[in-house]
Image (cartoon, grey):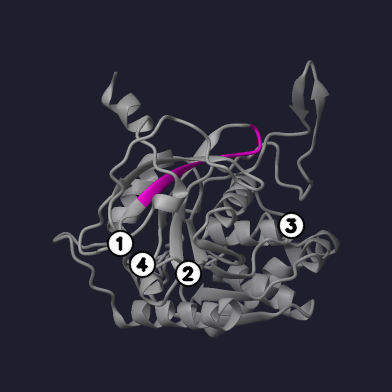
Amino acid sequence: MSSLSARLFRLVMPGSVGPALAAAAVAMSPVAAQAQAGLVYDTEEIAGSALPVTYHLVETHDGLYTAIGLRVPEGDGPFPIVLFASGNGGEGLGYVRDYSHNRSWTQEQFLDAGYAVAWLRYRSEVESPAYDGSLLSDRPWSGRAVLSRPPFEYEDVIATIEYVKSLPRIDAGRVGYMGMSHGGEMLMKMASVYGGIAAGIASEPASAAFLAVGAMDLTAPADRDEPETAAEYDAEKLAADVEATRRRIDMDVAMARIGRIDLPIFFQGRDRDHNQDVFRLNYELLEEAGKEVGWKSYDHELHGFAYVERNADGNYEPDPIQLEVVADSIEFFDRHLK
């Protein structure tokens, strides 16, 4: 048996996941879940922490599996949980392991505050068929099912949410989600069709597809002449960019999608980001629709600054802005999940 196969057969039931590493191996079998099945794959220590990460493989709509890295505070719970997503999908379990080991400082602060946490992964975003807000459906065919379209990446996250709600140490009524970049756009897409998230953070949400922005090729390569981070903040230019982007929106489509959203959302912008107009407009349209939303923008050099990465020496050294954004994020979830 290969080392990969051997690891796939080292399974731990969810109730045994705790602050100490799980030691028992059991035969491969699905974990019982109310709405979604999954397998517990492996448990690893995290450098500098007493709380390990346990990798789960979650069954998605079409029967394929996606990986998450779950960490839970000491104690029986049940605990509120915040699920973390970043960017487009793909890369599978390797991505989840990398982020669990090397970008876990933000999650450590949530664990200290009494939250369970998990890094998520999901299938890659696709260009065709384009997102149109339609619901995925299936019909019987030769004893199986034929889907109305391929599943989208945000639907993998919905499957993951349903799975974690079934775990014995998780409070199913207190599930939060924090998505960065495309992960923030996925919050919009999920919230417009699914009511299982109690509160969410859209950090630098790249929401052009959700907002039905037209008059631009959303699949074209980025303009390499435009830096991801401008040299300085220009309030006048931002206001003009927001209005220009507003004029490109199919407002009827965008507001119909927004109208179905019913959860508190905290929008986090980045002052000098080349997509700040989209971040800000996403917030403004929800505010105009009467949704429960908040906005704060931060001046940081890095896209994805809310997720602190280990430096070359293997240490975490969050800067003052990162300390601020994480404190703001925990305060937001404390108000809505505790």
> In terms of image quadrants, where is residue 9?
top left
Q: Residue at point 37% right, 31% down?
A: 8
Circle 4/circle 1 CB separation < 8 Å: yes
Q: Amino acid at mark 1?
A: Leu
Comes first in the chain, label 4 or label 1? 1
Q: Is residue 225 among the parts visible in the rendering? A: no
Comes first in the chain, label 2 or label 1? 1
Q: Residue furthest left?
A: 313
Name the foreground residue: 86 vs 285: 86
In this rendering, position of residue 166 left or right of residue 306: right
> In terms of image quadrants, where is residue 63?
top right
Task: Inspect the magenta stretch and tell me whether residue 58 lies in it.
Answer: yes
Residue occupied by mark 2 = 273
Q: Position of residue 61 (x, y in %)?
A: 66, 38
Q: CA distance from mark 2 to mark 1?
A: 35 Å
Q: Nearer the viewer, mark 3 or mark 1?
A: 1
Name the foreground residue: 294 vs 45: 45
Mark 2 packing: few (<14 Cα in 10 Å), some, or many (20+)?
A: many
